[in-house]
Amino acid sequence: MTGSDGSIKLDSMLCFAVYAAGHAFTRFYKPRLEALDLTYPQYLVFIVLWEQDDITVKALGDRLFLDSGTITPLIKRLEARGLVTRRRDEDDERQVRIRLTPEGRALREKAMAIPLQVAEGTGMTLESVERLRKELLDLRDQLDGGSRAKVPD
Amino acid sequence: MTGSDGSIKLDSMLCFAVYAAGHAFTRFYKPRLEALDLTYPQYLVFIVLWEQDDITVKALGDRLFLDSGTITPLIKRLEARGLVTRRRDEDDERQVRIRLTPEGRALREKAMAIPLQVAEGTGMTLESVERLRKELLDLRDQLDGGSRAKVPD
DNA sequence: CATTTTTATATTGTGCACAATTAAATTGTG
DNA sequence: CACAATTTAATTGTGCACAATATAAAAATG
């Protein structure tokens, strides 16, 4: 992270490598998501909804590590396009449940081609992808779990 | 990336691991950058400027993989706070050169403590940090270099 | 050397991302 | 049960991130 003189070196910083790789992924996805007319974060929301329909804003946020300030407007844009519906839970009116419309469900077919393109785009083997993914998962847990994980209060 | 039924699984996607780790880093840096009153992207700009002062907007963008649409307003905010100056290059008036003010240069002292905190925050050895960093660098190059690197036009 | 082409920066508009705040519903507690 | 504390979403405001476009300067071309 620092040179021998104590200076901070961009090229040796892990955070910058993560930051730049993230942008590269977004750029890579952009043309592939144009057929679906989705942004990358919107695509992630659909992946969650295709896995589990009828989910609350809270659960969606927990899954994607995003809060309502990000999710609410994103979902409203999808709702305006008729891809999802938003409805208050009848038993707990604090919660808003997100559901796929038939149109939103149908997007899944168009999306099926993308994972292969991404796999090819990374130029990595399935094994090295899996290893890297796991390392990043541990890193994330370390960074926002911190010491709490080891010493619970 | 996909399950045996062809479904897309968030938990097996490398892109999401990168995305989530990036947000975790930003969250991790936030309280540490409060003493400098800088955002994470602003901090990256200063790291470049501390390495090489008197740099053009273009060169800064190349270094951080950002375009003028991102950098120009960011720099203007730093200029408004008296941390940097912007001036057209005399020999090539298309270019704008960014320079540190004494105040901007002084921030470096306050920043020196951060790298160690981050190193501790990751909970990783220097070797594994370096290995992961390099893998992400290759991934980034693959993703936005693509096949062009091998077959130039 | 006039004209095209390229390069560098700025601007506008859209969409995240998140802190801080607000509002409403639910849960916990005396 | 009353009332405090917690939970869930939405809202407001700030700051990236980037596509598309505009503008001006410099370089390339015939």
Image (cartoon, coloured by chain):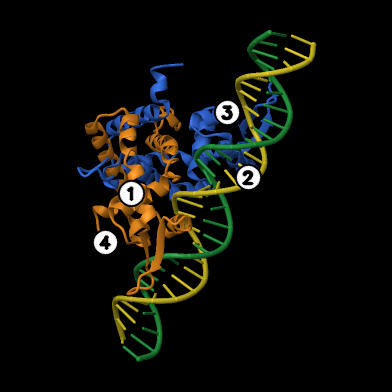
Chain colours: A orange, B blue, C yellow, D green
Measured in 3D between alpha carbons, the distance from the residue under mark 1 to the one under mark 4, in whole angstroms, is 35 Å
Residue assigned mark 3: B58
Q: Is residue A93 visible?
A: yes
Task: Establish whether labels 1 and 4 are both on one chain.
Answer: yes
Q: Amino acid at mark 4?
A: Asp
| Tag 1 subunit | A
- Give the residue at x 34% y 40%: B15
Q: Position of residue A29 (x, y in %)?
A: 41, 38
| Tag 3 subunit | B
Q: Position of residue A147 (x, y in %)?
A: 29, 51
| Tag 4 subunit | A
Q: Secondary structure at mark 2?
A: loop
Q: Amino acid at mark 1?
A: Ile
Whichever of labels 1 and 4 marks the residue nearer the N terminus, that label is: 1
User: Is B13 placed above or below A1 here?
Assistant: below
- Residues at marks 3 and 1 touching, judged by CB atoms closer than 8 Å: no
- Disc 3 packing (10 Å; few <14; some 14–19; many ≥20): some
Report the disc number at residue A153. Answer: 4
Measured in 3D between alpha carbons, the distance from the residue under mark 3 to the one under mark 1, in whole angstroms, is 37 Å
Report the disc number at residue B81. Answer: 2
- Tell me where residue A30 sits by quadrant: top left
Residue assigned mark 1: A47
Is B93 on the left or on the right of A119, as rendered? right
- Disc 4 packing (10 Å; few <14; some 14–19; many ≥20): few
Whichever of labels 3 and 2 marks the residue nearer the N terminus, that label is: 3
Front of the two marks 3 and 1: 1
Front of the two marks 1 and 2: 1
Q: Is residue B83 visible?
A: no
